[in-house]
């Protein structure tokens, strides 16, 4: 028997459907189509379009512009004992002057050390900023170390939660100004030897920050741990997971958003508490800088105080963004 000839329509359809023998060699890959810039972007990260970036950027830019405009217009109308309230331009001029003082101080320090001596000048504004950042970092670290374990235990044990809940509710509203004299006396009596790497003023401020900022982390951690899906707990019991395995594989991944929310709140509280503690105790930092400028009372003091106020707000905003980035990084592959 001879094979029936193919119809023209069937031949054309086969030509359209059949794939080439080496499709990878014919069709360009997705990686080859991607631009060099696109290949540098980590996998899974979505880059916003120009329209999305514009829609996200213009509201805050507009808000800041309106605020600065109102500030510039209304500041000359406010009279104080040191003159009119500084506007944005005056504050910027004072800020650049403070940076110039820092550069001059570093040059003097380098010259003194090169000559074999030591520099004994007063700390500049930039030095005070770094001092406050180190202090709040230490206090926040101590608060996190104390609050997260207590919160996890409180969330997993109703009896432990009932035991510490009255203490938490009593100690949480205590002002840092009330803690400060107690902490000062305890630290001064405890630190009898001089340690150049950790001064008494640094320890006092860090402990006050810890005592006032650990409560949001503790409470949020306990709430997050207690709100875990009961089915997950039952699965852990069926699988006969140990207490440590339940903690690391079930409790921590589920309560991680609550823990970071509490840490963000604690860091904000700690930053506010630190400025008040430094101002009252005259410990080195931004709070002491503000108080010293207030006591000086010269023509530039008000503008320099405004620089410190703006810096405190900007640094607080940056710290919050850093915590958000850490939460996103830790939670990027979170699975339960």
Image (cartoon, rainbow, N blue to C red):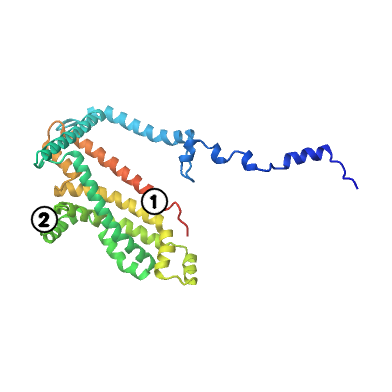
Residue sticking out furthest to the front = 1
Q: State the residue at coordinates (55%, 38%).
A: 32
Query: Distance of mark 1 from mark 2, alpha carbons?
Result: 38 Å
Q: Quadrant of residue 311?
A: top left
For the point 46% across and 67% down, which residue is it?
233
Position of 158 relative to 309 (above/below) = below
Mark 1–mark 2 CB contact (< 8 Å): no
* Number of other residues with Cα within 10 Å of mark 2, as a class: few under 14, some 14 to 19, many 20 or more: few
Q: Is residue 85 visible?
A: no
Q: What x and y, as percent, mark residue 94?
A: 20, 31
Residue that badge 2 annotates = 194
- Residue 34 screen position, x and y as percent: 53, 37
Name the quadrant containing residue 172.
bottom left
Pick the residue in front: 148 or 269.
148
Q: Which residue is mark 1?
A: 327
Residue shown at 13%/38% (left/top)? 109
Total marks in image: 2
Residue drawn at x 23%, y 27% as measured from the top left: 76
Instruction: Please tell me how crowded label 1 is: few (under 14), some (14-19), or many (20+) other residues with Cα within 10 Å.
Output: some
SS of the residue at dot 1? helix
Mark 1 or mark 2: name the one nearer the start of the chain.
Answer: 2
* Residue 152 visible at all: yes
State the image coordinates of residue 148 (x, y, percent, origin top left): 33, 60
| Depth check, front residue: 30 or 104 | 30
Q: Secondary structure at mark 2?
A: loop
Q: Is residue 170 left or right of residue 199?
A: right
Quarter assignment of residue 26: top right
Closer to the observer: label 1 or label 2?
A: 2
Residue 111 position, x and y percent, is: 12, 36
Say left or right for 237 vs 16. Answer: left
- Say if 297 sits above or below 331 in the image: above
In-image side of 14 versus 31 (left or right): right
């Amino acid at each position: 028997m001879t094979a029936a000839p193919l119809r023209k329509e069937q031949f054309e359809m086969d030509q359209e459907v059949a794939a080439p023998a080496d499709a990878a060699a014919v069709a360009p890959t997705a990686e080859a189509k991607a631009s060099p810039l696109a290949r540098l972007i980590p996998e899974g990260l979505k880059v916003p379009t120009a329209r999305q970036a514009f829609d996200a950027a213009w509201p805050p830019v507009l808000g800041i512009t309106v605020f600065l405009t109102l500030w510039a217009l209304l500041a000359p109308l406010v009279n104080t004992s040191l003159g009119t309230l500084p506007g944005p331009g005056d504050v910027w001029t004072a800020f650049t002057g403070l940076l110039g003082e820092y550069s001059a101080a570093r040059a003097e320090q380098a010259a003194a050390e090169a000559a074999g001596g030591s520099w004994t000048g007063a700390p500049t504004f930039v030095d005070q900023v770094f001092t406050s950042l180190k202090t709040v970092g230490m206090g926040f670290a101590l608060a996190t170390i104390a609050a997260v374990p207590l919160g996890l235990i409180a969330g997993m044990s109703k009896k432990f939660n009932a035991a510490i809940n009255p203490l938490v509710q009593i100690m949480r509203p205590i002002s840092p100004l009330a803690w400060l004299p107690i902490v000062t006396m305890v630290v001064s009596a405890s630190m009898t030897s001089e340690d150049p790497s950790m001064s008494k003023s640094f320890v006092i401020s860090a402990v006050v920050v810890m005592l006032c900022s650990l409560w949001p982390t503790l409470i949020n951690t306990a709430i997050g741990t207690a709100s875990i899906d009961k089915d997950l707990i039952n699965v852990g019991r069926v699988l006969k997971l140990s207490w440590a395995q339940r903690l690391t594989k079930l409790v921590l991944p589920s309560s991680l958003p609550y823990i970071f929310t509490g840490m963000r709140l604690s860091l904000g509280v700690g930053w506010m508490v630190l400025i008040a503690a430094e101002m009252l105790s005259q410990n080195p930092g931004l709070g002491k800088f503000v108080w010293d400028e207030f006591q000086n009372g010269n023509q530039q003091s008000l503008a320099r105080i405004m620089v410190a106020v703006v810096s405190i707000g900007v640094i607080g905003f940056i710290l919050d963004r850093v915590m958000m980035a850490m939460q996103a990084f830790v939670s990027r592959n979170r699975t339960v």
